[in-house]
Structures are given as structure tokens and as C-alpha cells.
Image (cartoon, rainbow, N blue to C red):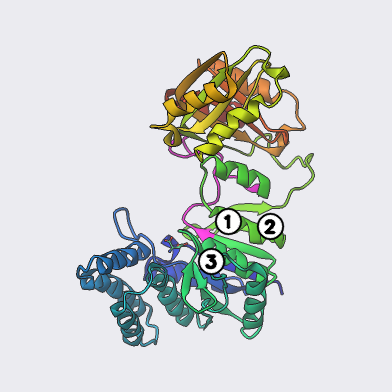
Amino acid sequence: MGVKVAKFGGTSAADAIQIEKIKNIVMSDPERRYVVVSAPGKRFAGDNKITDLLYLCKAQIDHNAPYDQVFQVVHDRFAAMALSLGVNIDMAEKFEEIKTALRDNPSADYIASRGEYLNAIIIAAYLGYSFIDTAGLVLFDKKGKFLHDETQLALQAELSKHERAVLPGFYGTYPDGRIKTFSRGGSDITGAIVASAAEADMYENWTDVSGFLMADPRIVKNPRAISRLSYMELRELSYMGASVLHENAVYPARQANIPINIRNTNDPDAPGTIITAEEDERDESFGIITGIAGSKDFSVLAVYKNMMSTEIGFIRRLLSVFEDYNIPVEHIPSGVDTVSIVVAKEYLEDKITDIIEDFERKAQPDSIEVFEDMALIATVGRGMASRPGVSAKLFTALSESGINIRMIDQGSSEMNIIIGVENKDFESAVRAIYNAFVN
Ligand code: ASP
């Protein structure tokens, strides 16, 4: 029998009704032996995530403001869940333990982690699985760096003692035993780490959407779901704004070569998206394009200098200015005597005049133009490299929709064509590309 690790996100574990769905999903496949859970998330629009309420408690404590009411809301949600599910756990005792800790103003990480901790205890009891606390098993060094190898060993030893178990996501411990969390959304990472330690055949990530969609549904009506995706394509799409999975969750699964299956707790029959390592590029089961993602609000600094291409070190001098200001550069499309530097607008705001001055001082360009309010759109798909006419199709679609392309960049992987358009054309450009390739 194979092993699957199933991670359920906040909305999948938001209340007793959702947790019943988890039980049906887990029980329907005996290979789902290890379950990782987030803290309860939002039950409806406008609701609070338990993790947010816990961070709020910490803020209140830090400001010497009363936190009892917020904590009571957390308490009541868990107590109601335990009651509705009919689990036989002494919740009062668990809450007493946390309340006592709160009196000593513990770290934000400790408080935030209690959402996952309590949820995992309740869900383990409801499923009849063991509860394994990730404190002491998911390990960080004293500076907070995740310790992969040590964690693998510790988790493997513990998992081998339990046929079936539920583990809380999101946190682990420093060497001195204090709680340390991953960044927000980090239960995805715990799920991948547990999958790797369990040598799972599949890491299932259960959420509230049926996998990755080919485009943002707020822009394209009913976009198709992506059934298969390579880790590299996933990286390109997430980088450009498509978010379903925490970025750092990919690494442990990829390293252990475990496929990730994004599934929908509210539609468990939908196959979702399977993310695997690269396969043969000529595999015809892949469409030409896999997905389209993008974001707005970039600035482009277009620099012109006669004979630039023969001047050694010119681009380095330009880029060193960004380094001085600690600004990440997104793209650098270039021509013979021009180079454009694309940067997220938020980093430039009040620095642009200083940056231009530094450019002039360090590289003496002939002219510099700044274009603001640009959007970048990435059309991603490994089917693109092997098929002629892909860019022709893309550019025809855009020109037929009257969209002015301000910038083009294609990485050497030939898996991604990035175009820059004005912010105002962003949505229509995404729709034009989608319709050209998908319909
Ligand atoms: N509960 C944490 C958060 O809201 C971690 C997670 O859900 O993955 O960020």
C-alpha cells in the first residue's frame, strides 16, 4: 500500500461541517495515512481566521490592552467544533494551559501556533488517528533557519511509530524548545516536509479551489483548470502572481520527487492539478500553453547610450545602482544601444530622482526615460519551446485586440514569454491571450 500525505488548509478545516468533509476524504482512501492541518480559516466572507485572532491577542498583550474577549472568540470556535464533532477531549484543560502561558506574554509565534495545535488535536480525535505534535520534530536552528536533514530524521523516527496520524502545520521549534513558525500560509510547507519524511507517493494539498486555473477567474470567465503542471512552470506562474500553494512548499516535495496534487475539499471528485517533475517536452498531453499570470504596477527605466553594446561594464554599472538601493530587478530586456530595467513600482516611489542621478554619474547614458504603470504578463508552458508560431499567435491576438505591447522578454528556457503592457490594458491582454490559445 502506498502512502499519501493530505494537508488541509484553513477553509477546509474552518468548522465542524468542513471537518466532516475531511473525514470522508481521508476515510475514502486508506493510503491517506498522514494528515497535516492548518488552523481554522474563514467560514464565510468577512469571518476571521483563527491565526489572525491569535496575532491580535498578542498585539493586545503587547499594548497592555485586555485580550480576554478576542481569546474568548477563539475558545468558543474550538469548543463549538469539538462539541459538534462529539470528540472526547478535555478542551478546558488545553485552554487553561494556553491561558497560563499568555500571562507571561509569550512570543507571537507561540500564540499563532496554537490554532494549528488545537485543530490537529480535535481532528486527530475525530478521525481516530494519533496526534503528533510538530514541536520538537520540525526543527530550526537558533537563528530560525529551517533544518531539513535533522527534521527528516526526527519526523521519520516519530512517524514510524504511528500507522496513522494528524500533525499541526505551520510551526516547529528552536533548539531550546521555543516555538518557531514558518511565514504565513506555512502549513503547506509542513505538509511537504511530512510527505518527504513519510516517503509519500503523493502530497495532496486540499484547499478550496479545484487546482490551478489557466488564468485568474476574476479576469477570464470560467478559465480551464490546469490538470498537470511541472515544478518549473509552477514557479513561473506563482512568481507572476498565481497563488494557490506557498512557494516554499515546492522545494521539499520536488527534492524528494513527490508529486503534489492540489484538490478541492468542497469538490472532492474533481481531479485537481498534479504537479510533477519535468517530463519529455514533446509529451502531447500538455497543451501549448499551461497558464497565464501577471501583475500590475511595474516601472520601466529605458536607458539609451550610443555604442552601448561595445562599452564594457555598462549594464553592471547600471545594475549596481539598484543594488545600492536594495531594489530587486525583475527583467532586463535589451537592444543594441538600449537596455530597459523593469522594477516593481513600490520600490521606486520616492527614490526615482536619486536613482537617475546615480545612473548619470556612474554610467553617463545619453538618455533615460521612465515609463510607469506597466503590467507584466507571463504566458507559460513548456509546450511552447517545441512548437513554431507560438509568439506569432500571441502577438497577433494582442494586436487584433488593439493592445500596444511595450516590452517583450523571453527567457532562455523558452517556457515563458513575458510581455509588458500598460496597466489599463492588463485585463484585456490576458483575455486576448487566453482566447487565442484556449478557445
Ligand atoms: N494558519 C497559518 C496562516 O493563517 C498557516 C496556514 O494556514 O498555513 O497563515
Numbered range of the magenta stretch:
206-229
**In this rendering, position of residue 398 left or right of residue 66:** right
* Residue 217 lies within the magenta run: yes
The answer, for residue 428, to whether it is visible in the render is: no
The residue that label 2 is drawn on is 254
The secondary structure type at the circle numbered 3 is loop
Q: Earlier in the sequence, mark 2 or mark 1?
A: 1
The residue that label 1 is drawn on is 248
The secondary structure type at the circle numbered 1 is helix
Q: Quadrant of residue 110?
A: bottom left
Check disc 1: other Cα within 10 Å, few if <14, some if 14-19, many if 20+.
Answer: some
Query: Residues at badges 2 and 3 in contact (C-beta under 8 Å)?
Result: no
Quadrant of ligand 1 in image: bottom left
Which numbered disc covers residue 212? none
The amino acid sitting under disc 3 is Lys
Query: Residues at badges 1 and 3 in contact (C-beta under 8 Å)?
Result: no
Q: Earlier in the sequence, mark 1 or mark 3?
A: 3
The amino acid sitting under disc 1 is Asn
